[in-house]
Amino acid sequence: MRWPRALGLAFVALLIAAPFGLPAFAMTLLTELVILGLFAMSLDLMVGYTRLISFGHVAAYGLGAYASGYMLLNTSLPLPFVVILATLLTGVIAIGVGWVCTLATGVSFAMLTLAFAQLLYAIAFKWTSVTGGSDGLAGIPRRAGPMGLTLLTTKTGFYYFALACLIGSFLLCRKLVASPFGAVLRGIRENEAKTVSLGFNTRLYKIAVVAIAYALGGLAGALYAPFAGFANTELLFWLLSGQVLIMVIVGGSGTLIGPILGAAFFLLLEHQLSSVTEAWALFFGLIFIGFVLFAPEGIWGLATGWVKRREKPLAKVRLRD
Amino acid sequence: MTDAGAALIGIAGLTRRYGALVAVDNVSMDVGAGEIRAVIGPNGAGKTTLFHLITGVVKPTAGHVRFAGEDITGLPAHAICQRGLSRTFQLTALFPQMSARENATLAAQARNPRRWLPFGGGNVFTQARRAGGAALELLGLAGVADRPAGLLSHGDQRLLEVAMAVAQEPTVLLLDEPTQGLSVEETAQVVETLSRFLEQSHVTALLVEHDMEVVFRLAHKITVLHRGAVIADGTPEAVKADARVQEAYLGGIE
Ligand SMILES: Nc1ncnc2c1ncn2[C@@H]1O[C@H](COP(=O)(O)OP(=O)(O)OP(=O)(O)O)[C@@H](O)[C@H]1O
Ligand SMILES: [Mg+2]
Protein backbone atom coordinates (compact mmCIF):
# COMPACT_ATOMS: atom_id res chain seq x y z
CA MET A 1 0.00 0.00 0.00
CA ARG A 2 2.54 2.63 -1.07
CA TRP A 3 0.05 4.51 -3.21
CA PRO A 4 -2.53 5.38 -0.55
CA ARG A 5 0.29 6.60 1.70
CA ALA A 6 1.70 8.87 -1.00
CA LEU A 7 -1.82 10.08 -1.74
CA GLY A 8 -2.41 10.78 1.95
CA LEU A 9 0.79 12.78 2.28
CA ALA A 10 -0.11 14.75 -0.84
CA PHE A 11 -3.49 15.55 0.75
CA VAL A 12 -1.83 16.77 3.91
CA ALA A 13 0.58 18.94 1.91
CA LEU A 14 -2.37 20.46 0.03
CA LEU A 15 -4.24 21.11 3.27
CA ILE A 16 -1.20 22.83 4.76
CA ALA A 17 -0.69 24.96 1.65
CA ALA A 18 -4.38 25.81 1.29
CA PRO A 19 -4.42 29.15 3.18
CA PHE A 20 -1.84 30.54 0.75
CA GLY A 21 -3.99 29.88 -2.30
CA LEU A 22 -7.65 29.85 -1.27
CA PRO A 23 -9.97 32.83 -0.79
CA ALA A 24 -11.44 33.51 2.66
CA PHE A 25 -14.86 31.91 2.05
CA ALA A 26 -13.19 28.73 0.80
CA MET A 27 -11.01 28.65 3.93
CA THR A 28 -14.14 28.85 6.07
CA LEU A 29 -15.56 25.88 4.18
CA LEU A 30 -12.26 24.00 4.49
CA THR A 31 -12.09 24.61 8.25
CA GLU A 32 -15.62 23.27 8.63
CA LEU A 33 -14.60 20.30 6.50
CA VAL A 34 -11.64 19.53 8.74
CA ILE A 35 -13.89 19.64 11.82
CA LEU A 36 -16.62 17.54 10.24
CA GLY A 37 -14.00 15.09 8.93
CA LEU A 38 -12.69 14.64 12.47
CA PHE A 39 -16.25 14.05 13.68
CA ALA A 40 -16.87 11.39 11.02
CA MET A 41 -13.51 9.73 11.61
CA SER A 42 -14.26 9.40 15.33
CA LEU A 43 -17.44 7.49 14.52
CA ASP A 44 -15.49 5.15 12.24
CA LEU A 45 -13.75 3.67 15.30
CA MET A 46 -17.12 2.36 16.41
CA VAL A 47 -18.85 1.68 13.11
CA GLY A 48 -15.97 0.58 10.91
CA TYR A 49 -13.65 -1.13 13.35
CA THR A 50 -15.98 -2.56 15.96
CA ARG A 51 -19.32 -2.81 14.11
CA LEU A 52 -20.94 -0.75 16.85
CA ILE A 53 -23.54 1.21 14.92
CA SER A 54 -24.48 4.47 16.61
CA PHE A 55 -27.56 6.55 15.80
CA GLY A 56 -26.57 9.14 18.37
CA HIS A 57 -23.01 10.22 17.72
CA VAL A 58 -24.22 13.79 17.70
CA ALA A 59 -24.20 13.50 21.50
CA ALA A 60 -20.40 13.64 21.43
CA TYR A 61 -20.35 16.60 19.05
CA GLY A 62 -22.93 18.57 20.98
CA LEU A 63 -21.34 17.83 24.36
CA GLY A 64 -17.96 19.01 23.12
CA ALA A 65 -19.45 22.11 21.51
CA TYR A 66 -21.52 23.18 24.52
CA ALA A 67 -18.69 22.43 26.95
CA SER A 68 -16.15 24.46 25.01
CA GLY A 69 -18.67 27.23 24.30
CA TYR A 70 -19.59 27.46 27.97
CA MET A 71 -15.97 27.56 29.09
CA LEU A 72 -14.98 30.16 26.52
CA LEU A 73 -17.88 32.37 27.57
CA ASN A 74 -17.65 31.90 31.33
CA THR A 75 -14.00 31.31 32.16
CA SER A 76 -10.77 32.93 31.10
CA LEU A 77 -9.08 29.67 30.10
CA PRO A 78 -7.15 29.87 26.83
CA LEU A 79 -8.65 28.14 23.80
CA PRO A 80 -6.37 25.07 23.60
CA PHE A 81 -7.02 24.23 27.27
CA VAL A 82 -10.74 24.65 26.77
CA VAL A 83 -10.65 22.29 23.80
CA ILE A 84 -8.65 19.69 25.72
CA LEU A 85 -10.97 19.93 28.75
CA ALA A 86 -14.09 19.61 26.59
CA THR A 87 -12.58 16.56 24.89
CA LEU A 88 -11.78 14.89 28.20
CA LEU A 89 -15.18 15.76 29.64
CA THR A 90 -16.94 14.18 26.67
CA GLY A 91 -14.76 11.09 26.95
CA VAL A 92 -15.43 10.69 30.68
CA ILE A 93 -19.20 11.08 30.24
CA ALA A 94 -18.99 8.57 27.37
CA ILE A 95 -17.64 5.92 29.74
CA GLY A 96 -21.05 6.01 31.40
CA VAL A 97 -22.84 6.14 28.05
CA GLY A 98 -20.81 3.19 26.82
CA TRP A 99 -21.49 1.29 30.01
CA VAL A 100 -25.24 1.68 29.57
CA CYS A 101 -25.40 1.23 25.79
CA THR A 102 -23.27 -1.94 25.80
CA LEU A 103 -25.89 -3.59 27.99
CA ALA A 104 -27.51 -4.10 24.58
CA THR A 105 -26.17 -5.15 21.19
CA GLY A 106 -27.04 -4.51 17.54
CA VAL A 107 -30.03 -2.29 16.85
CA SER A 108 -30.80 -1.93 20.56
CA PHE A 109 -27.31 -0.55 21.08
CA ALA A 110 -27.90 1.96 18.28
CA MET A 111 -31.25 2.96 19.80
CA LEU A 112 -29.69 3.52 23.21
CA THR A 113 -27.06 5.84 21.72
CA LEU A 114 -29.91 7.70 20.05
CA ALA A 115 -31.83 7.86 23.33
CA PHE A 116 -28.84 9.41 25.07
CA ALA A 117 -28.45 12.00 22.31
CA GLN A 118 -32.16 12.85 22.56
CA LEU A 119 -31.78 13.20 26.31
CA LEU A 120 -28.98 15.73 25.82
CA TYR A 121 -31.12 17.49 23.21
CA ALA A 122 -33.90 17.88 25.74
CA ILE A 123 -31.48 19.04 28.44
CA ALA A 124 -29.99 21.61 26.07
CA PHE A 125 -33.47 23.06 25.61
CA LYS A 126 -34.42 23.09 29.28
CA TRP A 127 -31.22 23.97 31.14
CA THR A 128 -31.32 27.55 29.95
CA SER A 129 -28.89 28.98 32.48
CA VAL A 130 -26.05 26.88 31.09
CA THR A 131 -27.04 26.10 27.51
CA GLY A 132 -28.97 29.21 26.56
CA GLY A 133 -32.06 27.13 25.83
CA SER A 134 -33.46 27.39 22.32
CA ASP A 135 -31.18 30.35 21.54
CA GLY A 136 -28.10 28.34 22.37
CA LEU A 137 -24.77 29.94 23.23
CA ALA A 138 -23.84 32.85 21.01
CA GLY A 139 -20.80 35.08 20.66
CA ILE A 140 -18.33 32.34 21.58
CA PRO A 141 -14.87 33.90 21.26
CA ARG A 142 -11.67 32.44 19.88
CA ARG A 143 -9.76 33.66 22.87
CA ALA A 144 -6.02 34.36 22.76
CA GLY A 145 -3.46 32.56 24.85
CA PRO A 146 -1.83 30.71 26.44
CA MET A 147 0.96 33.23 27.17
CA GLY A 148 -0.57 35.88 24.95
CA LEU A 149 -0.44 33.67 21.87
CA THR A 150 -2.76 35.33 19.36
CA LEU A 151 -2.33 32.88 16.48
CA LEU A 152 -5.61 31.07 17.20
CA THR A 153 -7.68 34.22 17.11
CA THR A 154 -7.08 34.54 13.37
CA LYS A 155 -9.01 32.46 10.88
CA THR A 156 -5.87 30.98 9.39
CA GLY A 157 -4.38 30.24 12.78
CA PHE A 158 -7.56 28.50 13.88
CA TYR A 159 -7.60 26.49 10.65
CA TYR A 160 -4.11 25.18 11.39
CA PHE A 161 -5.15 24.37 14.93
CA ALA A 162 -8.12 22.36 13.68
CA LEU A 163 -5.96 20.67 11.04
CA ALA A 164 -3.39 19.73 13.70
CA CYS A 165 -6.21 18.22 15.79
CA LEU A 166 -7.40 16.20 12.80
CA ILE A 167 -3.96 14.91 11.84
CA GLY A 168 -3.05 14.19 15.46
CA SER A 169 -6.31 12.29 15.98
CA PHE A 170 -5.82 10.41 12.74
CA LEU A 171 -2.33 9.25 13.76
CA LEU A 172 -3.66 8.31 17.19
CA CYS A 173 -6.50 6.29 15.69
CA ARG A 174 -4.14 4.57 13.30
CA LYS A 175 -1.91 3.50 16.19
CA LEU A 176 -4.95 2.36 18.10
CA VAL A 177 -6.39 0.13 15.36
CA ALA A 178 -2.98 -1.42 14.70
CA SER A 179 -2.43 -2.25 18.39
CA PRO A 180 -3.42 -5.41 20.28
CA PHE A 181 -6.50 -3.45 21.40
CA GLY A 182 -7.35 -2.86 17.75
CA ALA A 183 -6.98 -6.57 16.99
CA VAL A 184 -9.58 -7.32 19.65
CA LEU A 185 -11.91 -4.70 18.11
CA ARG A 186 -11.67 -6.51 14.78
CA GLY A 187 -12.48 -9.74 16.57
CA ILE A 188 -15.59 -8.13 18.05
CA ARG A 189 -16.51 -6.85 14.59
CA GLU A 190 -16.35 -10.27 12.99
CA ASN A 191 -17.58 -12.54 15.77
CA GLU A 192 -18.15 -11.15 19.22
CA ALA A 193 -19.28 -14.41 20.82
CA LYS A 194 -16.09 -16.09 19.66
CA THR A 195 -14.00 -13.19 20.94
CA VAL A 196 -15.59 -13.61 24.38
CA SER A 197 -14.99 -17.34 24.40
CA LEU A 198 -11.33 -16.73 23.53
CA GLY A 199 -11.05 -14.95 26.87
CA PHE A 200 -11.58 -11.28 26.00
CA ASN A 201 -13.94 -9.25 28.15
CA THR A 202 -15.44 -7.61 25.06
CA ARG A 203 -17.74 -5.32 27.02
CA LEU A 204 -14.76 -3.42 28.44
CA TYR A 205 -13.24 -3.07 24.97
CA LYS A 206 -16.53 -1.73 23.64
CA ILE A 207 -16.88 0.77 26.48
CA ALA A 208 -13.31 1.90 25.85
CA VAL A 209 -13.85 2.38 22.13
CA VAL A 210 -17.08 4.29 22.77
CA ALA A 211 -15.22 6.57 25.19
CA ILE A 212 -12.41 7.20 22.69
CA ALA A 213 -14.80 7.75 19.78
CA TYR A 214 -16.92 10.15 21.82
CA ALA A 215 -13.85 12.00 23.10
CA LEU A 216 -12.68 12.62 19.53
CA GLY A 217 -16.22 13.50 18.45
CA GLY A 218 -16.24 15.88 21.42
CA LEU A 219 -12.97 17.35 20.18
CA ALA A 220 -14.63 18.06 16.84
CA GLY A 221 -17.54 19.74 18.61
CA ALA A 222 -15.19 21.67 20.87
CA LEU A 223 -13.53 23.08 17.74
CA TYR A 224 -16.84 23.81 16.06
CA ALA A 225 -18.17 26.13 18.76
CA PRO A 226 -15.34 28.71 18.55
CA PHE A 227 -15.20 28.23 14.77
CA ALA A 228 -18.86 29.06 14.26
CA GLY A 229 -19.07 31.36 17.26
CA PHE A 230 -22.17 29.59 18.54
CA ALA A 231 -23.47 26.29 19.89
CA ASN A 232 -27.15 25.48 19.59
CA THR A 233 -29.47 22.51 19.77
CA GLU A 234 -28.95 21.73 16.10
CA LEU A 235 -25.58 20.33 17.14
CA LEU A 236 -27.53 17.75 19.16
CA PHE A 237 -30.26 17.05 16.62
CA TRP A 238 -30.69 13.44 15.47
CA LEU A 239 -30.47 14.44 11.80
CA LEU A 240 -26.76 15.16 12.19
CA SER A 241 -26.27 11.70 13.74
CA GLY A 242 -27.74 10.16 10.63
CA GLN A 243 -25.71 12.38 8.36
CA VAL A 244 -22.41 11.56 10.01
CA LEU A 245 -23.21 7.85 9.82
CA ILE A 246 -23.83 8.31 6.10
CA MET A 247 -20.54 10.19 5.73
CA VAL A 248 -18.74 7.22 7.28
CA ILE A 249 -20.40 4.71 4.97
CA VAL A 250 -20.18 6.78 1.79
CA GLY A 251 -16.53 7.59 2.51
CA GLY A 252 -15.62 4.01 3.33
CA SER A 253 -15.97 2.60 6.85
CA GLY A 254 -13.07 0.95 8.60
CA THR A 255 -10.48 3.08 6.80
CA LEU A 256 -10.30 6.27 8.96
CA ILE A 257 -9.43 8.31 5.88
CA GLY A 258 -12.63 7.35 4.06
CA PRO A 259 -14.99 9.06 6.52
CA ILE A 260 -12.96 12.26 6.21
CA LEU A 261 -13.51 12.11 2.45
CA GLY A 262 -17.16 11.27 3.08
CA ALA A 263 -17.49 14.42 5.18
CA ALA A 264 -15.81 16.46 2.44
CA PHE A 265 -18.12 14.98 -0.18
CA PHE A 266 -21.16 15.73 1.96
CA LEU A 267 -20.13 19.28 2.69
CA LEU A 268 -19.22 20.13 -0.90
CA LEU A 269 -22.43 18.60 -2.18
CA GLU A 270 -24.44 20.57 0.37
CA HIS A 271 -22.58 23.69 -0.62
CA GLN A 272 -23.12 23.17 -4.37
CA LEU A 273 -26.65 21.79 -4.32
CA SER A 274 -28.30 23.76 -1.54
CA SER A 275 -28.05 26.96 -3.64
CA VAL A 276 -29.67 25.18 -6.59
CA THR A 277 -32.37 23.13 -4.95
CA GLU A 278 -34.15 22.87 -1.62
CA ALA A 279 -34.22 19.10 -2.01
CA TRP A 280 -30.47 18.60 -1.92
CA ALA A 281 -30.77 16.24 1.04
CA LEU A 282 -32.85 14.02 -1.21
CA PHE A 283 -30.03 13.85 -3.73
CA PHE A 284 -27.61 13.01 -0.99
CA GLY A 285 -29.96 10.26 0.13
CA LEU A 286 -30.04 8.82 -3.38
CA ILE A 287 -26.27 8.92 -3.60
CA PHE A 288 -26.10 7.16 -0.26
CA ILE A 289 -28.39 4.39 -1.48
CA GLY A 290 -26.26 4.09 -4.60
CA PHE A 291 -23.13 3.61 -2.54
CA VAL A 292 -24.73 1.04 -0.27
CA LEU A 293 -25.95 -0.96 -3.27
CA PHE A 294 -23.07 -0.63 -5.71
CA ALA A 295 -19.99 0.44 -3.78
CA PRO A 296 -20.29 -0.62 -0.14
CA GLU A 297 -16.55 -0.08 0.24
CA GLY A 298 -17.14 3.67 -0.17
CA ILE A 299 -15.16 6.43 -1.85
CA TRP A 300 -11.82 5.43 -0.34
CA GLY A 301 -12.42 1.77 -1.21
CA LEU A 302 -13.22 2.73 -4.82
CA ALA A 303 -10.12 4.91 -5.05
CA THR A 304 -7.68 2.37 -3.63
CA GLY A 305 -9.31 -0.40 -5.68
CA TRP A 306 -8.90 1.66 -8.84
CA VAL A 307 -5.23 2.34 -8.07
CA LYS A 308 -4.62 -1.35 -7.38
CA ARG A 309 -6.24 -2.40 -10.66
CA ARG A 310 -4.06 0.08 -12.54
CA GLU A 311 -0.94 -1.02 -10.74
CA LYS A 312 -1.29 -4.64 -11.76
CA PRO A 313 -1.25 -4.24 -15.58
CA LEU A 314 1.60 -1.76 -15.15
CA ALA A 315 3.61 -4.33 -13.25
CA LYS A 316 3.04 -6.84 -16.04
CA VAL A 317 4.22 -4.41 -18.69
CA ARG A 318 7.37 -3.76 -16.73
CA LEU A 319 8.05 -7.44 -16.48
CA ARG A 320 7.82 -7.80 -20.22
CA ASP A 321 10.32 -5.04 -21.05
CA MET B 1 -4.71 -41.56 35.59
CA THR B 2 -5.88 -39.74 38.71
CA ASP B 3 -8.39 -40.68 41.36
CA ALA B 4 -11.61 -38.77 41.88
CA GLY B 5 -10.26 -36.85 44.87
CA ALA B 6 -7.74 -35.08 42.67
CA ALA B 7 -10.21 -34.41 39.88
CA LEU B 8 -9.30 -31.40 37.74
CA ILE B 9 -12.93 -30.80 36.83
CA GLY B 10 -15.65 -31.66 39.28
CA ILE B 11 -19.23 -31.34 38.11
CA ALA B 12 -22.00 -31.79 40.65
CA GLY B 13 -25.75 -31.79 40.09
CA LEU B 14 -25.44 -29.58 37.02
CA THR B 15 -28.87 -28.76 35.58
CA ARG B 16 -30.16 -26.49 32.85
CA ARG B 17 -33.83 -26.07 32.06
CA TYR B 18 -35.42 -24.43 29.04
CA GLY B 19 -39.00 -24.01 30.15
CA ALA B 20 -40.32 -27.52 30.67
CA LEU B 21 -37.37 -29.08 28.84
CA VAL B 22 -34.45 -30.23 30.98
CA ALA B 23 -31.53 -29.98 28.57
CA VAL B 24 -28.99 -31.04 31.19
CA ASP B 25 -30.41 -33.01 34.08
CA ASN B 26 -28.52 -33.31 37.36
CA VAL B 27 -25.22 -34.26 35.74
CA SER B 28 -22.30 -35.13 37.99
CA MET B 29 -18.90 -36.23 36.74
CA ASP B 30 -15.22 -35.90 37.56
CA VAL B 31 -12.47 -35.53 35.02
CA GLY B 32 -8.89 -36.14 36.13
CA ALA B 33 -5.86 -34.21 34.95
CA GLY B 34 -4.51 -35.59 31.67
CA GLU B 35 -7.67 -37.57 31.03
CA ILE B 36 -9.37 -37.67 27.67
CA ARG B 37 -13.08 -37.89 28.29
CA ALA B 38 -15.61 -38.47 25.55
CA VAL B 39 -19.18 -37.27 26.07
CA ILE B 40 -21.56 -39.16 23.83
CA GLY B 41 -25.29 -39.47 23.40
CA PRO B 42 -28.01 -39.21 20.78
CA ASN B 43 -28.99 -35.90 19.16
CA GLY B 44 -30.44 -33.49 21.69
CA ALA B 45 -28.98 -35.41 24.62
CA GLY B 46 -27.54 -32.20 26.07
CA LYS B 47 -23.85 -32.57 25.17
CA THR B 48 -23.42 -29.11 23.71
CA THR B 49 -25.42 -27.57 26.54
CA LEU B 50 -23.14 -29.33 29.03
CA PHE B 51 -20.13 -27.72 27.29
CA HIS B 52 -21.89 -24.35 27.35
CA LEU B 53 -22.46 -24.74 31.10
CA ILE B 54 -18.85 -25.68 31.81
CA THR B 55 -17.45 -22.81 29.72
CA GLY B 56 -19.88 -20.16 30.96
CA VAL B 57 -21.65 -19.59 27.66
CA VAL B 58 -24.91 -20.66 29.34
CA LYS B 59 -25.65 -20.24 33.06
CA PRO B 60 -26.83 -23.33 34.94
CA THR B 61 -30.25 -23.53 36.57
CA ALA B 62 -28.67 -25.53 39.39
CA GLY B 63 -25.47 -27.33 40.28
CA HIS B 64 -21.77 -26.54 40.38
CA VAL B 65 -18.65 -26.74 38.26
CA ARG B 66 -15.32 -26.84 40.06
CA PHE B 67 -12.05 -26.43 38.23
CA ALA B 68 -8.69 -27.04 39.90
CA GLY B 69 -10.39 -26.88 43.28
CA GLU B 70 -12.22 -23.59 42.67
CA ASP B 71 -15.88 -22.98 42.02
CA ILE B 72 -16.23 -21.49 38.53
CA THR B 73 -20.02 -21.86 38.29
CA GLY B 74 -21.66 -18.89 36.61
CA LEU B 75 -18.45 -17.01 35.85
CA PRO B 76 -18.52 -15.19 32.51
CA ALA B 77 -17.18 -17.15 29.54
CA HIS B 78 -14.09 -14.96 29.12
CA ALA B 79 -13.11 -15.42 32.76
CA ILE B 80 -13.44 -19.19 32.53
CA CYS B 81 -11.32 -19.24 29.38
CA GLN B 82 -8.69 -17.16 31.17
CA ARG B 83 -8.43 -19.91 33.79
CA GLY B 84 -7.29 -22.31 31.10
CA LEU B 85 -10.37 -23.89 29.53
CA SER B 86 -10.42 -23.44 25.76
CA ARG B 87 -13.13 -24.79 23.51
CA THR B 88 -14.33 -25.24 19.98
CA PHE B 89 -17.93 -24.90 18.84
CA GLN B 90 -20.12 -27.45 17.12
CA LEU B 91 -21.03 -24.80 14.55
CA THR B 92 -17.69 -23.46 13.37
CA ALA B 93 -17.03 -20.06 14.93
CA LEU B 94 -14.17 -18.15 13.30
CA PHE B 95 -13.25 -14.66 12.16
CA PRO B 96 -14.01 -15.28 8.49
CA GLN B 97 -12.31 -12.23 6.99
CA MET B 98 -9.10 -12.64 8.94
CA SER B 99 -6.47 -15.06 7.69
CA ALA B 100 -6.05 -18.37 9.46
CA ARG B 101 -2.86 -16.95 10.97
CA GLU B 102 -4.66 -13.87 12.30
CA ASN B 103 -7.32 -16.12 13.82
CA ALA B 104 -4.74 -18.18 15.65
CA THR B 105 -2.77 -15.06 16.63
CA LEU B 106 -5.80 -13.42 18.19
CA ALA B 107 -6.53 -16.61 20.11
CA ALA B 108 -2.97 -16.66 21.45
CA GLN B 109 -3.07 -12.92 22.19
CA ALA B 110 -5.81 -13.62 24.74
CA ARG B 111 -3.20 -15.38 26.88
CA ASN B 112 -1.01 -12.28 27.18
CA PRO B 113 -1.61 -10.11 30.26
CA ARG B 114 -0.98 -7.10 27.99
CA ARG B 115 -3.52 -8.24 25.41
CA TRP B 116 -5.43 -4.93 25.71
CA LEU B 117 -2.48 -2.60 24.93
CA PRO B 118 -3.90 0.35 22.94
CA PHE B 119 -0.64 1.27 21.18
CA GLY B 120 2.48 -0.46 19.91
CA GLY B 121 2.31 -4.00 21.19
CA GLY B 122 5.12 -5.41 19.06
CA ASN B 123 6.01 -7.94 21.76
CA VAL B 124 2.41 -8.97 22.29
CA PHE B 125 2.06 -9.66 18.58
CA THR B 126 5.41 -11.43 18.28
CA GLN B 127 4.57 -13.81 21.10
CA ALA B 128 1.05 -14.42 19.87
CA ARG B 129 2.21 -15.01 16.31
CA ARG B 130 4.73 -17.55 17.53
CA ALA B 131 2.18 -19.48 19.59
CA GLY B 132 -0.44 -19.18 16.85
CA GLY B 133 2.00 -20.27 14.17
CA ALA B 134 3.08 -23.30 16.21
CA ALA B 135 -0.56 -24.35 16.63
CA LEU B 136 -1.22 -23.99 12.91
CA GLU B 137 1.88 -26.06 12.18
CA LEU B 138 0.76 -28.71 14.65
CA LEU B 139 -2.62 -29.07 12.99
CA GLY B 140 -1.18 -29.08 9.50
CA LEU B 141 -2.51 -25.67 8.51
CA ALA B 142 0.80 -23.93 7.81
CA GLY B 143 0.16 -24.18 4.08
CA VAL B 144 -3.12 -22.24 4.22
CA ALA B 145 -2.16 -19.86 7.02
CA ASP B 146 -2.46 -16.71 4.93
CA ARG B 147 -5.85 -17.46 3.42
CA PRO B 148 -8.98 -15.84 4.84
CA ALA B 149 -10.54 -18.27 7.29
CA GLY B 150 -13.90 -17.94 5.57
CA LEU B 151 -12.43 -19.32 2.34
CA LEU B 152 -10.85 -22.44 3.83
CA SER B 153 -12.34 -25.87 3.19
CA HIS B 154 -14.81 -27.05 5.79
CA GLY B 155 -12.24 -29.52 7.12
CA ASP B 156 -9.56 -26.87 7.46
CA GLN B 157 -12.04 -24.59 9.21
CA ARG B 158 -12.73 -27.31 11.78
CA LEU B 159 -9.00 -27.78 12.24
CA LEU B 160 -8.47 -24.04 12.51
CA GLU B 161 -10.90 -23.88 15.39
CA VAL B 162 -8.96 -26.60 17.15
CA ALA B 163 -5.72 -24.77 16.34
CA MET B 164 -7.09 -21.60 17.93
CA ALA B 165 -7.92 -23.48 21.12
CA VAL B 166 -4.51 -25.17 21.06
CA ALA B 167 -2.77 -21.82 20.51
CA GLN B 168 -4.08 -20.80 23.93
CA GLU B 169 -2.06 -23.60 25.52
CA PRO B 170 -5.05 -24.57 27.64
CA THR B 171 -5.16 -26.83 30.67
CA VAL B 172 -8.44 -28.26 29.42
CA LEU B 173 -9.47 -28.55 25.81
CA LEU B 174 -13.17 -28.95 25.05
CA LEU B 175 -13.94 -30.14 21.52
CA ASP B 176 -17.56 -30.18 20.37
CA GLU B 177 -17.80 -32.61 17.43
CA PRO B 178 -14.56 -31.64 15.71
CA THR B 179 -15.35 -33.96 12.79
CA GLN B 180 -18.93 -32.87 12.22
CA GLY B 181 -19.79 -32.40 8.57
CA LEU B 182 -16.49 -33.79 7.33
CA SER B 183 -15.98 -36.38 4.62
CA VAL B 184 -14.54 -39.78 5.55
CA GLU B 185 -11.08 -38.74 4.38
CA GLU B 186 -11.23 -35.42 6.20
CA THR B 187 -12.41 -37.15 9.37
CA ALA B 188 -9.50 -39.57 9.20
CA GLN B 189 -7.11 -36.65 8.78
CA VAL B 190 -8.57 -34.64 11.65
CA VAL B 191 -8.61 -37.65 13.97
CA GLU B 192 -5.02 -38.51 13.05
CA THR B 193 -3.88 -34.97 13.80
CA LEU B 194 -5.91 -34.79 17.00
CA SER B 195 -4.71 -38.09 18.41
CA ARG B 196 -1.11 -37.12 17.70
CA PHE B 197 -1.62 -33.81 19.47
CA LEU B 198 -3.44 -35.30 22.45
CA GLU B 199 -0.70 -37.88 22.94
CA GLN B 200 2.08 -35.32 22.75
CA SER B 201 0.54 -32.59 24.86
CA HIS B 202 -0.92 -34.49 27.83
CA VAL B 203 -3.70 -31.92 27.85
CA THR B 204 -6.95 -32.78 29.61
CA ALA B 205 -9.65 -33.04 27.00
CA LEU B 206 -13.43 -33.31 26.82
CA LEU B 207 -14.65 -34.51 23.48
CA VAL B 208 -18.16 -34.66 22.08
CA GLU B 209 -18.24 -37.00 19.15
CA HIS B 210 -20.81 -39.06 17.28
CA ASP B 211 -18.34 -41.28 15.45
CA MET B 212 -17.85 -44.26 17.78
CA GLU B 213 -14.65 -45.33 16.09
CA VAL B 214 -13.17 -41.94 16.84
CA VAL B 215 -14.43 -42.10 20.44
CA PHE B 216 -12.99 -45.54 21.12
CA ARG B 217 -9.71 -44.57 19.53
CA LEU B 218 -9.17 -41.38 21.54
CA ALA B 219 -11.02 -41.60 24.85
CA HIS B 220 -9.77 -42.95 28.17
CA LYS B 221 -13.23 -42.71 29.64
CA ILE B 222 -16.71 -42.15 28.29
CA THR B 223 -19.75 -40.41 29.73
CA VAL B 224 -23.06 -41.23 28.08
CA LEU B 225 -25.87 -38.66 28.17
CA HIS B 226 -29.47 -39.40 27.34
CA ARG B 227 -32.22 -36.79 27.60
CA GLY B 228 -29.88 -34.62 29.64
CA ALA B 229 -28.96 -37.25 32.23
CA VAL B 230 -25.87 -39.44 32.63
CA ILE B 231 -26.84 -43.06 31.95
CA ALA B 232 -23.35 -44.54 31.93
CA ASP B 233 -19.87 -43.46 32.87
CA GLY B 234 -16.67 -45.47 32.67
CA THR B 235 -14.02 -47.07 30.51
CA PRO B 236 -14.81 -47.62 26.83
CA GLU B 237 -15.14 -51.38 27.39
CA ALA B 238 -17.55 -50.98 30.28
CA VAL B 239 -19.66 -48.45 28.41
CA LYS B 240 -19.77 -50.57 25.28
CA ALA B 241 -21.12 -53.48 27.31
CA ASP B 242 -23.73 -51.39 29.14
CA ALA B 243 -27.26 -52.49 28.33
CA ARG B 244 -28.82 -49.07 28.87
CA VAL B 245 -26.38 -47.49 26.44
CA GLN B 246 -27.27 -50.05 23.80
CA GLU B 247 -30.93 -49.30 24.38
CA ALA B 248 -30.53 -45.52 24.28
CA TYR B 249 -28.59 -45.73 21.08
CA LEU B 250 -30.86 -48.20 19.37
CA GLY B 251 -33.90 -46.20 20.42
CA GLY B 252 -32.43 -42.72 20.14
CA ILE B 253 -30.58 -42.43 16.86
CA GLU B 254 -32.60 -42.19 13.76
N1 LIG C 1 -31.26 -22.04 23.82
C1 LIG C 1 -32.11 -23.08 23.88
N2 LIG C 1 -33.41 -22.87 24.04
C2 LIG C 1 -34.28 -23.91 24.10
N3 LIG C 1 -33.91 -25.19 24.01
C3 LIG C 1 -32.60 -25.47 23.84
C4 LIG C 1 -31.64 -24.43 23.76
N4 LIG C 1 -30.42 -25.00 23.59
C5 LIG C 1 -30.63 -26.32 23.55
N5 LIG C 1 -31.94 -26.62 23.70
C6 LIG C 1 -32.52 -27.95 23.75
O1 LIG C 1 -31.80 -28.71 24.69
C7 LIG C 1 -31.63 -30.03 24.26
C8 LIG C 1 -30.16 -30.39 24.26
O2 LIG C 1 -29.52 -29.68 23.21
P1 LIG C 1 -27.98 -29.84 22.92
O3 LIG C 1 -27.66 -28.93 21.80
O4 LIG C 1 -27.22 -29.67 24.17
O5 LIG C 1 -27.89 -31.33 22.44
P2 LIG C 1 -26.65 -32.13 21.84
O6 LIG C 1 -26.49 -33.33 22.65
O7 LIG C 1 -25.49 -31.25 21.69
O8 LIG C 1 -27.24 -32.52 20.42
P3 LIG C 1 -26.49 -32.70 19.01
O9 LIG C 1 -25.91 -34.07 19.01
O10 LIG C 1 -27.58 -32.58 18.02
O11 LIG C 1 -25.48 -31.63 18.91
C9 LIG C 1 -32.27 -30.12 22.87
O12 LIG C 1 -33.56 -30.67 23.02
C10 LIG C 1 -32.33 -28.69 22.44
O13 LIG C 1 -33.43 -28.49 21.58
MG1 LIG D 1 -24.37 -30.62 20.14
Image (cartoon, coloured by chain):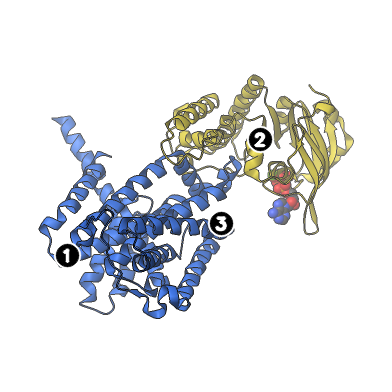
Are labels 1 and 2 assigned to the same chain?
no
Identity of the amino acid at label 3?
A: Trp
Q: Residues within 10 Å of mark 2 (few under 14, many from 20)?
A: some
Q: Which mark is residue A99?
A: 3
Residue toward you, B9 or A190 = B9
**Ligand 1 within 8 angstroms of badge 1 C-beta:** no
Please tell me how many numbered marks the rendered image carries. Answer: 3
Q: Which residue corresponds to the image point at 52% horizontal and 66% vertical from the top-left?
A: A111
Q: Which residue corresponds to the image point at 35% horizontal and 58% vertical from the top-left?
A: A83
Left or right of A25: which side holds A50? right
Residue depth check, mark 2 versus mark 3: number of the one nearer the observer? 3
Residue A19 visible, this orientation: yes
Residue occupied by mark 1: A26
Q: Which chain is yellow?
A: B
Residue toward you, A63 or A266 = A63
Residue A118 lies, in percent from the top left, at: 48, 72
Identity of the amino acid at label 1?
A: Ala
Q: Which residue corresponds to the image point at 30% horizontal and 53% vertical from the top-left?
A: A165
Residue B43 visible, this orientation: no
Instruction: Check the residue under mark 1 and report the chain it is in.
Output: A
Residue occupied by mark 2: B83
Left or right of A167: which side holds A96? right
Residue A218 lies, in percent from the top left, at: 39, 60
Instruction: Check the residue under mark 2 and report the chain it is in.
Output: B
Identity of the amino acid at label 2?
A: Arg
Left or right of B87: which side holds B102? left
